[in-house]
Image (cartoon, helix red, strand yellow):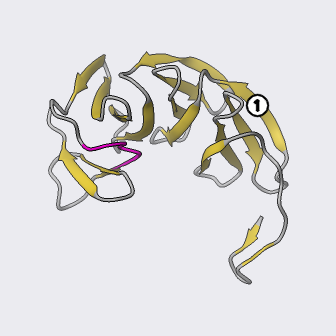
Amino acid sequence: KFSSRSRSVISTQTIGDGPARVLITPDGSRLFVSLFGENKVAVVDAETGAVQEKVDLGAGPAGMVFGPDGTQLFVASRSGNFVSIFNTTTLRSEGDIATQNTPSAVAIAADGSTLFVTNQSSNSLQTIFLRPLRHKVLSAEPLFADPGAAVTVTGRRFTEDAVVYFNGERAQTTFVDE
């Protein structure tokens, strides 16, 4: 736990092996931690820090993003070449979506219709249209080495979703149009 008032660590809790990403639910009650070293996602009570459950979601879970209403969690499985869809209410898998090589980060459009996946080994940005389910690789050329993070931006200045992804050295933006 961390106190934002005193800017100090109150307590620490061991969650698991190889934590890659942490997300907090929209209501602030739980944390979801991708445990790359265990091939699981830990569900943690945000108040107590207690691990409620560890769910097996494939090989090498890494990047994660909630769907717009928070009831679905999309988890990139770096070693398995897929994205798992996880129900945050039932804590059960709703299936997997195949990706290109080494998916590392995921982002979702504000309306929940489109998932964006950066694929590390192929240096590509993959677009997965969720309704109906279909795939498209946006980049014919490599984006740049190791596209490691992705976020979507929707706002007054954009007429469509923009995907911004980073590799620690520079950022690149792709505007998405079906």
Q: Quadrant of residue 138?
A: top left
- 20 left or right of 8? left
Secondary structure type for disc 1: strand
The count of marks equals 1
In the rendered view, tell whether residue 4 sits above or below residue 13.
below
Mark 1 = which residue?
Answer: 54
Q: Residues within 10 Å of mark 1 (few under 14, many from 20)?
A: many
Q: Is residue 99 above or below residue 149?
A: above
Residue 129 image-quadrant placement: top left
- Percent position of residue 42, x then y: 72, 37
Q: Is residue 9 shown in magenta?
A: no
> Which residue is nearer to you in this view: 119 or 7?
119
- Image quarter in which the C terminus is found: top left
Residue 124 in the image: state x and y as whole percent.
28, 33
Residue 70 vs residue 13, the one in the foreground: 13
Q: Residue at x 83, y 54 (%)?
A: 13
Near-viewer residue (52 or 119): 119
Residue drawn at x 39%, y 23% is 101
Q: Position of residue 75 (x, y in %)?
A: 53, 32
Which region of the structure is painted magenta? 144-151
In the picture, the quarter occupied by the N terminus is: bottom right
Q: Amino acid at mark 1?
A: Lys
> What percent of the width, then of the height, locates residue 44?
76, 45
Q: Is residue 150 magenta?
A: yes
Pick the residue in front: 176 or 119: 119
Q: Is residue 119 left or right of residue 144?
A: right
Instruction: Determine the residue positioned at 45% across, 21% down.
Output: 81
Magenta residues, dominant SS class: loop
